[in-house]
Image (tube, rainbow, N blue to C red):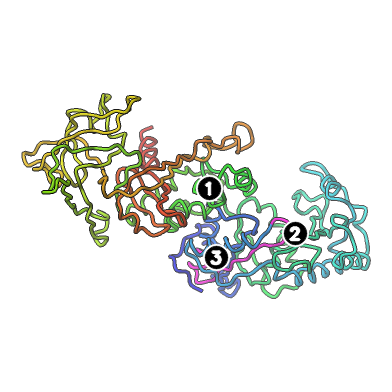
Amino acid sequence: MANTVDAVHAGDFIADRVREDNSTGRYQGRVQTRFPPEPNGYLHIGHAKAITADFGIATEFGGSCNLRLDDTNPDTEDVEYVESIIDDIAWLGYTPANVFYASDYFTALYEWAEVLIQTAKAYVDDQDADTISAQRGGFGKPGIESPYRERTPAENLRLFRAMRAGEFADGSKVLRAKIDMQAENMQLRDPVLYRIRRSQHHRTGDAWVIYPTYDWAHGQSDALEGVTHSMCTLEFEAHRPLYDWCLEQLPLPYEKPQQLEFARLELTHTVTSKRRLRKLVDDAIVTGWDDPRMPTLVGLRRRGYPAAAIRAFCKHIGVNKTNSRHAVEELEAFVRTELNQSALRRMAVLRPLKVIIDNWPTDSAGEPIVEWFTLNNNPENVNDGTRSVPFSGTLYIERDDFAETPPPKFFRLSPGREVRLRGAYLITATDVVKDLAGEVIAVHCTYDPQTRGGDAPDGRKVRSTMHWVSVDHAVTAVVKCYERLFNAELPGERTGEPLDDVNPDSCLTMLECKVEAALQDSAPGEVVQFERLGYFCKDLETPMLFHRTVGLKDDWANAQRRNSKV
């Protein structure tokens, strides 16, 4: 099935391999990939790279890509994660040719395990996990063969079938491949293929009490589906000889698939370990997997990251064979570029300060006149049209846009200084109102009626343009602004535990923000630009709650300019 997004080039070395295979007739010109996540958590930004690679290669070469849920560990997997994975892939813009599960193949995998046993390539071991681990040895340290390694195929088959029938306790026996306990590659030192585990499986219930390991299920599932190019991240490179060995022992329905490894995506100020992400959720450091500070796809989506920006970022960094860490600012630059083209503009005041225009005209009843100004919805796209914004004699501006005693190079509003209100008039501050604590709570101003639209007819210049919202027409909103979830660029580099670097002040909630009434009509999940402040996403569920997606300042571009001068 074709995908709705453009092909994403998955990297020269993988594409070159596919071209070579096609030129030699391997797989008869067929290209089939798969994305095989384990449903034990939510997908994160690192998975986005694998998704774009798997689907990108298939699209580029006219092939297909399946989604396969690697559900071989019932203790940690759940339907919630299955559903979130399917939803995330669709949101990212991809349509799997098929949705499969490793559990679809439990019977076939079991039967193939019996083939190994019958050909003396696997045996049942009665030792516990710690003993087996210790006997495997290590680099430069020889392995020790299990005392059960030379059991006869008949005995192993009897025991394995008894394992399947539930005659033994959890952990009392395992099935191991019989390869080479002295192999330099530790993965080949008689790895475990099956273990006894009485856990309720989200699809098969209690039909099975033995479950295949990843190494036994992965390659064989690829073969059963007809996968040609099985792409994994670099940590699975050491598993490739075992992947090949398992497939070589079996009567396959298709030509043996090949495993290709590429570097995983790592970002600064970010952790993608599922175990640590789960701890952030369990310890209530974040509000859930979809917390906008999380690197999960549901979190990025709730924060307002466009799927197109994530795809473009993954395409930009490409796929290579060397692990590296990318600056999170680089991803944010792609988000900002996409939103600059697509996001409507609105005015919002996050820390309101009242401005009273003393010479503003009133009608015959003494009520302030309301004027309407026409503003562009998006100067980057004329097709987005315009909107009418009300202006009256009492406004809100940002508290930071006023200083009673201005510091050097402060060009915004202060006593005696004239500034421009965006698209409206020039105003000059004349006086302030303070509360009992001495805090300024209102600023009195005058306006120049000859400056409608923001320009003076005599050509005089002002050095600051500020956004505003009419008090009588403003709507109250809650806005959440985010900093890095982790203070350290490389979380855990100092102590070895990334969660030690969690930023306790990563979320600032502002309750009494004043915004244009037009924002009431924004759709849940829509991202708009709050002029001068950044891009903000309307929450998917809570009305008038907005999450800051990214600011307007391009930190990545600035860093690139600084580096070019070094």
Q: Residue at x 80, y 56 (%)?
A: 192
Rounded to the nearest angstrom, the CA distance separating label 2 from label 1 is: 29 Å
Task: Give the residue type that dot 2 points to.
Answer: Thr
Viewer-nearest of labels 2 and 3? 2
Residue holding disc 2: 213
Q: Is residue 372 above or below residue 552?
A: below
Between 287 and 304, the residue placed more toward the observer is 287
**Disc assigned to residue 412:** none
Task: Give the residue type that dot 3 points to.
Answer: Val
Task: Report if residue 64 lies within the magenta region.
Answer: yes
Of callouts 2 and 3, which one flags the residue occurring earlier in the amino acid sequence? 3
Task: Report if residue 393 lies within the magenta region.
Answer: no
Q: In the rendered structure, are the residues bearing label 1 and label 3 in contact, judged by CB atoms less than 8 Å apart?
A: no
Residue holding disc 1: 294
- Rendered image quadrant of residue 449: top left
Query: Residue 351's spot in the image, x, y percent?
Result: 35, 38
Judged from the image, the secondary structure of the residue bearing numbered disc 1 is loop
Judged from the image, the secondary structure of the residue bearing numbered disc 2 is loop
- Rendered image quadrant of residue 239: bottom right
**Total marks in image:** 3
Task: Give the residue type that dot 1 points to.
Answer: Met
Rounded to the nearest angstrom, the CA distance separating label 2 from label 3 is: 29 Å
Q: Is residue 64 above or below residue 537?
A: below
Of callouts 1 and 3, which one flags the residue occurring earlier in the amino acid sequence? 3
Q: Horizontally, is 234 left or right of 56 in the view?
A: right
Instruction: Give the extent of the magenta segment.
Output: 55-76
